[in-house]
Image: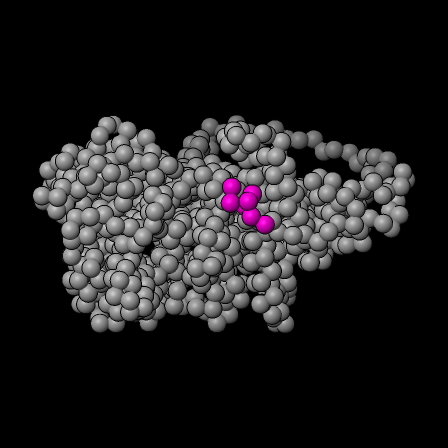
Amino acid sequence: MKSFDQTGSLDPADSLDPADSLDAADSLDAADSLDAAGSLTPTLDPLTRVLFGDDFDGEHAPWRRLAAAAPFRRRPGASSGERLAMAYGRLRTVNDALDSPAGLVADPRGLAALHEWLGPVDPAFTTVAGIHYNLFLGSLLDHAESEAESEAESEKDGARGTARDLAGSAASAGPAASRGSAASLGSAGQADLADFFALRRVGTFLCTEVAHGNDAVAVETTATYDRERDGFVLRTPHAGAQKFMPNTSPAGGPKSGVVAARLLVDGTDHGVFLFLTPLTDSVGALPGVRVRRLPARLGSPVDHCLTAFDRVFVGREALLGGAQGRIDEDGEFRSEQSNRRRRFLTSIGRVTAGKLSMSACAVGSARVTLALAVRYGGHRHISGSRGGEPVPVFAHRSHHGPLVGALATVFAMTLLHRTALDVWESRTEADADEAERLVAVAKGWISWRAREVIVESRERCGAQALLENNGMTELLAGIEGVITAEGDNVAIYAKAAAEMLFSAAPAPAPAPVSSPSSFSSSGQEDGSYGPAGRELTDPLFLNELLVAVEAVWLARARRRMSQVPHGDSLARWNAASGAALRAVEAYAYRRASEAYAVAVAGLKSAPASSPSAHDLLRSLHRLFALQWIDRNSGDLLAAGRLAPRHLDELPEAVEQLISRLAGHAPALVESFALPEEMLADWPISAAGYVDAYDDAEGAWHAAPAVPAVPAAPAVPPVSAVPPVPAVPPVPDAPPAPGALSVPAAPA
């Protein structure tokens, strides 16, 4: 039975047994062993370790095994309702395999790995799983942590726990303890969490409203404190305040949610807090709760709903408070934070971990679609130039060029995601804001790049990739949801841009001159133009150029802002925002390239391979950096960072790298370690993809008909045959001129 250890990692030694199935048809018997699919072979490309880290077996292999398991196989022809039921069934399959759901909740890496491997298999499942484990249970456990810290501070004993500590303590006591009374998790235990750990009740998250999305701090659902009953009354004041898109239907079982509502105490608005609220039972919505299904969304089916409250009462313990605010025993509101916006951001802090999961989902989806495209490009043959000899379509530069560029991008996406995870887990109070910014920007950059990779991969596969059974359309629709979830990408970038405008920019090395004016009229360098002596093969030079791109756009944004008079903040922001958003993009490219550089430095060349993994990774890094530099070459030339000759050399260098890497594309895709069981769900991945369209009743399967032998003509009787006239002898004649005379054979 799969299990989680105290850090929330699946035990790699465990395997799925029949109890992990969705139903009897999905059960795994001895013949369904996943050992081969779930573990790395000794000869596996070391690039896999670059992508997934040294602890592949502990962090990723268990989720990879699940992705290959029978309960996660596709069911062709399933209706939307059946697919939704399957998503919740898979949620139970995973939950039943966990020794400690609390351990998973407290482990950002475990949550991210779940999304990275299972997101491409079933986006609907990862949607409901991310909401239940991260946004819902995560908010409850973080509340327990905050309450424990506040109580410890009030007692001045200096004890400060963490959600990981709390969850780990529960896990160390064994599965029974982690699924028992929530009282063991702190004062949040006033609400019994056992039903949520056991999935007897599914958790959901109700924050955004019809009229409030990225400005969720302005939500209008109210929670008014009722002193007589010592609790809160939740109310939806108008149509725009209905909760928008939570999965609050009865599908999947009874549900509770954490509801973002404006806390009103004696007429005073204290800002937006979260309230634990029962929503539905096994039949439908509870009294006072109104749930209506929204129209079907693009992509995988999830039970997104409109949800409203008509004087729904919850007890005082329903408030998820802490340092940001709480109601004391005497009914008075107290908070250690005076800023209402800060209180709200503290309450929804789980959104940052959600961004990491969204990045992981995007990375996993991009890798899968790119792998499908590369495999299909090798299987699909077209007529060649010599006598119609067929060649793989991948052999053409016009086909493999974009896919090789996508390979360099996918490696960059993966490495930036790992960096963001590392930075978030190791953050301190001093660098927490920078860590949160990196996580947010990485989510935006990775999901946008994933969309580009998925679209390119889809196009390279033609009409085949438009069919639902080949998976790409579902993943393309899924990435659109990732771009919007846990903060719209543009809003994320805008927040980061505003922060970067008023912070120190990365300091590039000073350019010797500010423009190429030091070149002679003949176009020859006079020796004073600094970059002329630098080469595009120098990784330090490439890194300086990436830093310079970011600095150029930040300087441009600040200059534009300074040209607008003070007093009109919107006009000043509008003047600067275009360039500032480009600076954020450049920041993401720089951080991704730096992650590449660390990986290249850490990967020692393997003499046995030709070319080595080290050389391949270095080439991928150069291609990634050069393509970004090429896009910004005009600005870099104007800023004195490039010499004119570099503008000619850039496209040549890119072409050389693409030619070098194209032949290794299948091996690079193999480093993704995608299980064949998962890929087999999509016919386009196999060399025999034509078999998916075969027709058992097609005429080509019929045995060829044996042609009938015509009857011999009737032979007339001998007496009826007229006599043959005698033929007179032919006199000998001399041979014609030039004719070959063959002498008669001697008697």
- Tell me the quarter of the picture where residue 479 sits: top left
The residue furthest left is 228
Residue 676: image x %, image y %? 41, 57
Q: Quadrant of the N terminus?
A: bottom left
**Seen in the image, is 501 located left or right of residue 731?**
left
Nearer to me, 611 or 454: 454
**Seen in the image, is 551 located left or right of residue 57?**
right
Q: How is the rendered protein coloured?
A: one colour
Residue 323: image x %, image y %? 30, 54
Residue 167: image x %, image y %? 27, 64
Nearer to me, 536 or 91: 536
Q: Which residues are magenta?
A: 498-504
Q: Residue at x 39, y 56 (%)?
A: 112
**Seen in the image, is 530 located left or right of residue 418?**
right
Let me know if residue 27 appears in the view.
no
450 shown above or below 33: above
Q: Residue at x 61, y 42 (%)?
A: 554
Q: Residue at x 55, y 35 (%)?
A: 577
| Residue 661 included in the magenta stretch of the image | no
Nearer to me, 111 or 373: 111
Q: Residue at x 34, y 47 (%)?
A: 338
- Tell me the quarter of the picture where residue 60 sits: bottom left
